[in-house]
Image: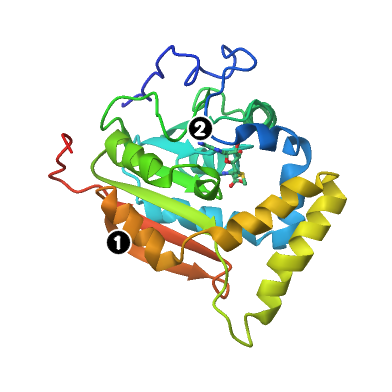
Amino acid sequence: MSHAPEPTSSPVGAPLAQAAAGDVLGGSGAMFDGIAKRYDLLNRVMTFGIDQRWRRRAIALLALPANARVLDLATGTADLAIMTAQLHPDAHVTALDPSRGMLAVGAQKVAAAGLQTRVSLVVGDAQALPFPDASFDGVTMSYGIRNVPNRLVALREMTRVVRPGGRIVILEATEPEPGLLTWGARLHIRVVVPRLGAWLSGAPAEYRYLQKSISEFPSPAAFAELMRQAGQDVVAVVPLLLGVSHLWVARVPQRLDRAK
Ligand SMILES: C[S@@+](CC[C@H](N)C(=O)[O-])C[C@H]1O[C@@H](n2cnc3c(N)ncnc32)[C@H](O)[C@@H]1O
C-alpha cells in the first residue's frame, strides 16, 4: 500500500498541529482566517448546495488508481479532501492551505468524519509545495487557484509533484459568457454574492474581493493555455451551469522534462 509523502519540516509545509502562528509565507490565506467559521454555510447558501456536486465531479475526473495518494490544494475547510477520502476508502489525502483558521475548521470536520488517519492537514502555499517530485497520483484544487498570486508557478508545482500519467483537476468560479440566459447568473455573482456574503459573514471586503477575483480570472481557454505552459496535457475543459464555474482536467505527460 502506498503512503502519503511526509511534508518537509520547514515552517511552511508543517502539519497543522506543529505549525506555529504567523509562519505562513505568501498566498492570501490570512484573508480567509476571518471568514473560516461561516465559510461552509455561505458556500451552501450562495451556490444552493450545487458546489458539493461539482466537487464530486472533480473527484470522478481524477480517475484515481487503487491506494491513491492525493493532494488537495487550497483545501480550506477540507470539503474536497474529506469527500475524496470517503469516495476512495483506500486513498490517503494530503490537504494543504495557508489559512490556519480554515484548516482548524477542516480539522474538526476530518475528526468528526473519523478520517484522521487518511486525511493529513498541512499548512502551506501552492507556489512552493513541500513534497518531492512525482509523489502523488493526483492533485485537486477547488475555488483556490484564483487566490494564488503566481498561478503559473503553482501550476508548475502541481506538474512537479504528480507522477507521470497522474491527473490534475481544477475547479474554479468563472464569469459566464454574456447572453440572455446568463444574465441571471451574472447578476447572482456580481450583486447577490457580494451582498449576501457581506451580510451573512460580516466581512464585506472579503466578499467584494470574491466578486472582483472572479471577474479578473482568465477565460477558460486562457487558463487551459497556462496549464499547457506549466507542462500539463489538458484533457478537458468543462463548463458548469452556464459557465459560472469550470473544471479543467489535465494529465502529467509520461515523458516530462523535469529539468525545464
Ligand atoms: C474559496 S477557498 C476554497 C476552499 C476549498 N477548496 C473549497 O472548495 O471550499 C480559497 C482557499 O484558498 C486558499 N489560498 C489562498 N492563497 C493560497 C495559496 N497561495 N496556496 C494555497 N492556497 C491558498 C485560502 O486560504 C482559502 O482557504
Q: Residue at x 67, y 81 (%)?
A: 183
Mark 1 near ligand 1 (CB under 8 Å)?
no
Give left or right: position of 186 versus 156.
right
Q: Residues within 10 Å of mark 2 (few under 14, many from 20)?
A: many
Most distant residue in the bottom direction? 180
Residue 157, picture quadrant:
top left
Q: Distance between the residues labelled 1 and 2?
A: 24 Å
Can you give x and y, in whole percent of width and height, for residue 117 in the image? 51, 22
Amino acid type of the residue that numbered disc 1 sits on in the rendered structure: Val
Give left or right: position of 129 versus 108.
left
Amino acid type of the residue that numbered disc 2 sits on in the rendered structure: Ala
- Residue on which the image places disc 1: 235
Determine whether 82 is above or below 47 in the image: above
Q: Is mark 2 on a helix, strand or loop?
A: strand
- Residue on which the image places disc 2: 95
Q: Which residue is drawn at 59% across and 14% down?
A: 17
Q: Residue at x 49, y 20 (%)?
A: 12
- Quadrant in which the C terminus appears: top left
Can you give x and y, in whole percent of width and height, for residue 112 in the image? 68, 30
Q: Is mark 1 on a helix, strand or loop?
A: strand
Residue 66, picture quadrant:
top left
Q: Which corner quadrant of the figure contains ligand 1? A: top right
**Colouring rule applied to residues:** rainbow
Q: Residue at x 49, y 63 (%)?
A: 246
Of 83 and 190, the residue lying toward us: 190
User: Is there any visible trace of residue 101 in the rendered image?
Assistant: yes
Can you give x and y, in whole percent of width and height, for residue 249 in the image? 36, 57
Give left or right: position of 190 versus 58.
right
Mark 2 near ligand 1 (CB under 8 Å)?
no
Q: How crowded is mark 1: few (under 14 residues within 10 Å), some or many (20 or more)?
A: some
- Mark 1 or 2 closer to N-term? 2
